Amino acid sequence: MALSKTRITTHAMSEQAAAAIPSALRTLEAEASGVTALATALQADLGVRFAATIDLIQNAKGRLIITGLGKSGHIGRKIAATFASTGTPAFFVHASEASHGDLGMITADDIILALSWSGEQPEMKNLINYAKRFKIALVAMTSDPTSTLATAADVSLTLPKAREACPHNLAPTTSSLMMLALGDALAIALLESRGFSPRDFSVLHPGGKLGAMLKYARDLMHTGEAVPLKPLGTRMSDALVEMSAKGFGCVGIIDANGQIAGIVTDGDLRRNMRPDLMTATVDEVMTRNPKTISPNLLAGQALELLNSSKITALLVAEGKKPLGIVHLHDLLRAGVA
């Protein structure tokens, strides 16, 4: 009976939940309109201030300090994390904690990016005074250009007014998203300006699936005696022994100069099944000019190539010189897929 009641309750809640879809759509539409208004503002005066902020951050000798409190503080933490992970040294300092010793974390070479929708939070005053005292560049992100924070800042990024998704126009929703979006825009503009590459990204993201995707073929490839290789002229019977012993489902074929001439795969065996196959040479069976990858290819890109080519292994080479081999299972074990 208890199970039956649970099912009935769940069914009733599902019907109620369906009525929430219009509410969800209104929220998304409100937040989307806020971001659209932000994009429009960037094409006017906000764009000039945005560019000035980029110049300040690029030319800073120190780090970017993000500060805020309340919902703006939560957004500030995320913005700081995005900056740090895309090549701009940054960290978050809570505006309240700053007045109780954390101001010591901020140096004269740093830049402060202060987030406050109203620009009038009392906790910001000590931080503003500190910035003025030590001539620390201050950038404000606020909706009120006449606020205490905006007028004290060297650059004020004034966000356009927008209605919150909350039906009472109280809970920070649209405003929080606009702050986050503008923070992302700053971080990505700096990333592009600095030429921050996937290789740079991999240095800062060694863990998890993202870290695995940013490993290189050279990090995962098998080398030396583990690589299945045979010279031109090898009988297929010997090539099959090599293929089976190494366990990659293929064997690379090299010429007299040690350059890759072709590859024999399981598929080649199936396509060439005939009574004299074992006495034939690899020259008759191999696929010439096989796909190879650079040792500097990202693991994620290697996986895409394996999938698109419908193969399970790739020889790693510099030009035609074989260096190793990468198998689909290596990528799976590394967490790439």
Image (tube, rainbow, N blue to C red):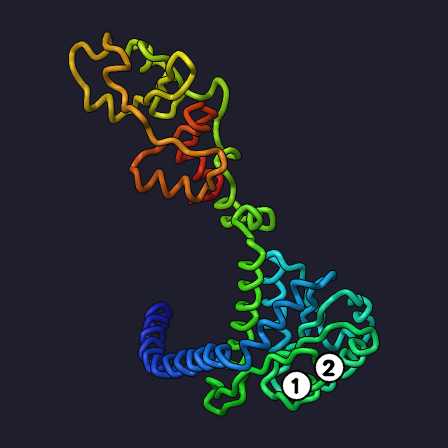
- Asked whether, in this view, residue 229 is left or right of residue 77, the answer is left
- How would you rate the neighbour count of disc 2 (Cα within 10 Å): few for under 14, some for 14-19, many for 20 or more? many
Helix, strand or loop at mark 2: helix
Tell me the amino acid under the disc marked 1: Gly
- Asked whether, in this view, residue 240 is left or right of residue 97, the answer is left
Count the marks: how many?
2
Quadrant containing the C terminus is top left
Residue 156, given in percent of the width and then of the height, sits at 64, 80
Image quadrant of residue 193? bottom right
Helix, strand or loop at mark 1: loop
Residue picked out by circle 1:
119
Residue picked out by circle 2:
124
Looking at the image, can residue 70 be seen?
A: no
Image quadrant of residue 251? top left
Q: Are marks 1 and 2 in contact (CB under 8 Å)?
A: yes
- How would you rate the neighbour count of disc 1 (Cα within 10 Å): few for under 14, some for 14-19, many for 20 or more? many
The residue at 79%/70% (across/down) is 102
Q: Is residue 259 above or below residue 23?
A: above
Between 41 and 241, the one nearer to me in the picture: 41
Between 253 and 220, the one nearer to me in the picture: 253
Tell me the amino acid under the disc marked 2: Met
